[in-house]
Image (cartoon, helix red, strand yellow):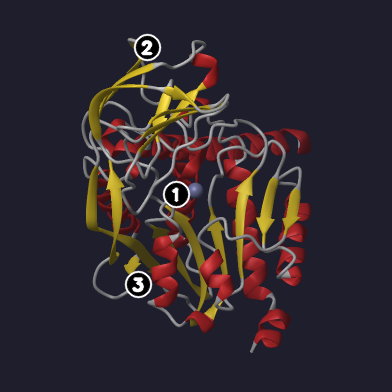
Amino acid sequence: MKLRLTLLLLSLSGAASAQDSLFARHLVDTLTSSYFWGRGYTRDGMGKTSDFISGQFKSYGLQPLNGKDFIQPFSFNVNTFPGAMNIALNGKPLIPGLDFLVAAESRGIKCKGKLIKQDSVHFIDPQDRIIITLRDKLTWDVDQGTADYTAIDLLKSNFKDQPSSIDINVESKLVPGFKTGNICGMIRGTAKPDSFIVMTAHYDHLGGMGDKTYFPGANDNASGISELLSLARYYALHPQPYSMVFICFSGEEAALLGSKYFSENPLIPLKNIRFLVNMDMLGTGEEGVTAVNATVYPKEFALLKLANDDGHYLVKVASRGKAPNSDHYWFSEKGVPAFFIYTMGGIKAYHDVYDVSKTLPLNEYNHLFKLLVAFNAALMKDNTVLANKN
Ligand SMILES: [Zn+2]
């Protein structure tokens, strides 16, 4: 009888987990679809994403953090590639994203030129200011300005001949003051509404390179956004003693700009933030997770480890020191205790066209969800740490 009940309970929790995983998969599929065009700077990808997330917040019943709407607007300059993206080398047309990337700072150009070998990996057309670099892996980026040259990264394994001639038509456009915003919502605390637990994730990615190629960013960071939305939906149904704040940052890929803006223009007093957890690249986890800033906040890291040991969630919770590698950075620099959590193991796609939903396992999604809920509960219970802080 006992065994039967245990099995029944197991299958019940299994059903709930399966449903949550479906919710996560659906969100990652949605956010990586061509409609959102890599959540970037062309085809209104970022604007559509911010509308979508605001709609989700509203449907869960979150309140706008500023009391009016979910958006905290800001802007920055960005170099974009809205149109033509055609390159042929030695008369052979190349496929954008697969064979080559145009470096994010590149100026647009339309010409035919001769290439001169500089060394084993560099080929240049000095007249047209074109630089070709042979690479073992293609990795894209975002740049806030336009350079006075065109730089092309060529995947070595896809082009065996020595580049000698180029036929290029690449369109670039500098957008001054590109308008975007952070999406900020809250669930008011039941006992201590002026104390905050903050969950963050960036929703922007790299966008598109030309009119046929976009970067889906399934792991980076549709995975983090889907985890954040799951938590927001859960906490809306289960209000906590502290106010739970959810922030989806923009401009992360352009140098952590959204989080910088929020940390300099906070919508809540930074000193009232008990803890901030930033989630970026959560789509794997077979080798566990890493917490950046673990060595800076050892007491909270002990709570995180304890929560994981109690629940047997992830195979490992690894400790890492301070690193300016995601949106937690500006907060901990201002004295807000914060971790940046990312998963380990699995796929290696990063800032390329292969970071797609289809190959993203999302295998530890439910465990991570449970770990974060347990960690937040421990933070709200742990008065000793809070007393030390005040
Ligand atoms: Zn990221």
Q: Is residue 308 visible?
A: yes
Tag nearer the camera, 2 or 1? 2
The answer to whether the residue labelled 1 contacts the one labelled 3, judged by CB atoms less than 8 Å apart, is: no
Report the front residue among 293 and 89. Answer: 89
**Residue 192 against residue 83 in the figure, above or below:** below
Whether the residue under disc 2 has CB within 8 Å of ligand 1 = no
Residue under label 2, please give it. 90
Q: Is residue 187 visible?
A: no
Q: How far apart are marks 1 and 3 (CA)?
A: 18 Å
Q: Distance between the residues labelled 2 and 1?
A: 43 Å
Which image quadrant is residue 292 in? Answer: bottom right
Residue at 27%, 31% (x, y): give it: 210
Q: Which of marks 2 and 1 is nearer the N terminus?
A: 2
Badge 2 element: loop
Residue at 42%, 79% (x, y): give it: 268
Which quadrant of the rendered structure holds the N terminus? top right
What amino acid is labelled 3 in the image?
Answer: Leu
Determine crowd level at label 1: few under 14, some 14-19, many 20+ residues with C-alpha closer than 10 A: many
Q: Which of marks 2 and 3 is nearer the N terminus?
A: 3
**Residue 183 against residue 385 in the figure, above or below:** above
Which quadrant of the rendered structure holds the C terminus? bottom right
Q: Earlier in the sequence, mark 1 or mark 3?
A: 3
**Residue 109 against residue 86 in the figure, above or below:** below
Residue under label 3, please give it. 65
Report the front residue among 292 and 174. Answer: 174
Report the front residue among 307 and 320. Answer: 320
- Residue 375, horizontal then vertical, whole percent: 65, 62
Residue under label 1, please give it. 225
Residue at 50%, 60% (x, y): give it: 327
Tag nearer the camera, 2 or 3? 2
